[in-house]
């Protein structure tokens, strides 16, 4: 990366420079992506298993993720929900929004509880209590704090043991439920209550943990990143995760109105910009085959994504350039891994927000 500029220049190199991490042992590049073609013959059911009337913030995309997840997985699904935004906003005694079996667990033990449920289902099938041919999905629906930080150990153990559990991480990039503190997935340069921007330090000085790649390093059958602004791609990945013979992990970016500080009407727009700028790349690793599922022929500058959010408004132009350099390097690494250009160069002529229908 080029020399860090502005207030970033005063931060120790070992903190602010992210090392290459795309290449993983045993991972090979996949052939042409079949996802959209497979989705064309996959019809979502009309039944709703994530019910309206929740207490999520205006424009919160957790509801979009949960609703489509359950449409794909269906009624034979058990949801393990660690403490977080989804838990406190969707179950307020005596009402709940989950029309499937649901259990609230602590911040740190989602993977462990799901492992126990999956093992219990296997035991009950062996005893004939449950039909051995009946497919029951066990899902952990957890935020970044309960996944990348507090629940990291339980997640790793679950993946290592090979439990057939679908782990869905909705990533709003901070502890938004408890006061917008930084988490292990808070991006470089964002201002939070525990990593505030000041005269000498420009907000958070660490990078997002590459959770999908960390999960893939366990050698599990299916790993993917997704973005609810691209519902077709996200739904396809829920379907693939449900078909995996073993653990699967989905890392889904989730916009947060109070934490990211944008107008509610931009909840989907800001997620589109995350992918259009290369800040967030949608990919999958299916049985060791890596593919980018949402190619971007020409990128918008990363400032388009940053300037829509209040958590980045303290950044000076030279500091935005530093973040652009980080994104450029990540994109170059992905293109190198793919052996061809799937994420294109920055085109400064592109408008940050394109009118709908164009």
Image (cartoon, rainbow, N blue to C red):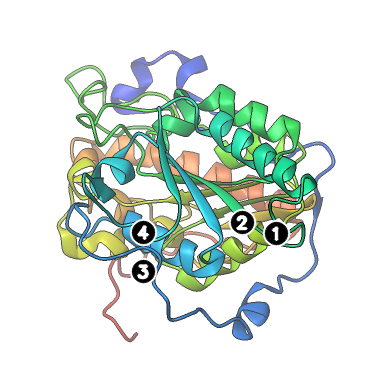
Q: Earlier in the sequence, mark 2 or mark 3?
A: 2
| Residues under numbered marks 2 and 1 in contact, where contact means CB atoms less than 8 Å apart | yes
Q: Residue at x 57, y 26 (%)?
A: 154
* Label placed on residue 349: 3
Cα distance, mark 4 to mark 2? 15 Å
Q: Residues within 10 Å of mark 2 (few under 14, many from 20)?
A: many
Cα distance, mark 2 to mark 3? 26 Å
Q: Earlier in the sequence, mark 4 or mark 1?
A: 4
Cα distance, mark 4 to mark 3? 20 Å
Q: Is residue 64 above or below residue 46?
A: above
Residue to which mark 2 is pinned: 283
Q: Where's residue 273, x and y in %? A: 36, 60
Q: Where's residue 48, x and y in %? A: 39, 71
In the picture, measured across the screen, residue 209 lies left or right of residue 302, that is: right
Q: Residue at x 32, y 27 (%)?
A: 182
Q: Earlier in the sequence, mark 4 or mark 2?
A: 4
* Label placed on residue 291: 1
In the picture, measured across the screen, residue 28 lies left or right of residue 148, that is: right
How many badges with numbers are in the image? 4
Residue to which mark 4 is pinned: 271
Q: Is residue 355 above or below residue 347?
A: below
Q: Where's residue 187, x and y in %? A: 38, 36
Q: Is residue 179 above or below residue 281?
A: above
At numbered mark 3, what does the secondary structure look like: helix, strand or loop? loop
Q: Quadrant of the C terminus?
A: bottom left
Q: Residues within 10 Å of mark 3 (few under 14, many from 20)?
A: few
Q: Residue at x 63, y 45 (%)?
A: 165
Q: Earlier in the sequence, mark 4 or mark 3?
A: 4
Cα distance, mark 2 to mark 1? 6 Å
């Amino acid at each position: 990366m080029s020399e860090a500029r502005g207030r970033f220049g005063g931060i120790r190199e070992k903190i602010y420079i992210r090392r290459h991490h795309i290449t993983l042992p045993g991972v090979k590049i996949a052939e042409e992506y079949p996802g959209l073609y497979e989705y064309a013959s996959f019809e979502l059911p009309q039944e709703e298993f994530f019910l309206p009337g929740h207490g999520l913030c205006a424009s919160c995309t957790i509801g979009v993720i949960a609703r489509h997840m359950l449409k794909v997985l269906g009624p034979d699904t058990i949801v393990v929900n660690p403490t977080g935004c989804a838990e406190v906003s969707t179950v307020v005694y005596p009402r709940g929004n989950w029309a499937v079996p649901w259990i609230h667990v602590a911040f740190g033990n989602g993977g462990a509880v799901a492992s126990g449920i999956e093992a219990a289902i296997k035991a009950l099938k062996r005893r004939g209590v449950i039909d051995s041919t009946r497919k029951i999905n066990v899902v952990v629906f957890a935020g970044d704090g309960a996944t990348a930080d507090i629940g990291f150990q339980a997640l790793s153990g679950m993946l290592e043991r090979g439990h057939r559990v679908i782990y869905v991480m909705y990533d709003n990039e901070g502890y938004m439920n408890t006061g917008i503190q930084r988490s292990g997935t808070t991006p470089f340069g964002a201002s939070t209550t525990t990593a505030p921007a000041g005269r000498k330090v420009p907000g958070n000085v660490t990078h997002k943990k590459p959770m999908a790649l960390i999960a893939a390093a366990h050698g599990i059958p299916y790993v993917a990143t997704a973005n609810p602004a691209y519902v077709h791609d996200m739904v396809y990945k829920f379907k693939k995760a449900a078909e995996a013979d073993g653990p699967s992990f989905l890392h889904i970016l989730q916009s947060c109105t109070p934490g990211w500080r944008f107008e509610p009407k931009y909840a989907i727009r800001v997620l589109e910009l995350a992918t259009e700028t290369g800040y967030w790349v949608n990919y999958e690793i299916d049985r060791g085959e890596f593919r980018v599922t949402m190619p971007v022929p020409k990128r918008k500058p990363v400032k388009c994504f940053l300037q829509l959010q209040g958590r980045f408004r303290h950044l000076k132009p030279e500091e935005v350039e530093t973040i652009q350099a980080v994104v450029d390097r990540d994109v170059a690494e992905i293109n190198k891994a793919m052996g061809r250009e799937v994420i294109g160069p920055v085109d400064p002529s592109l408008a940050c927000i394109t009118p709908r229908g164009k």
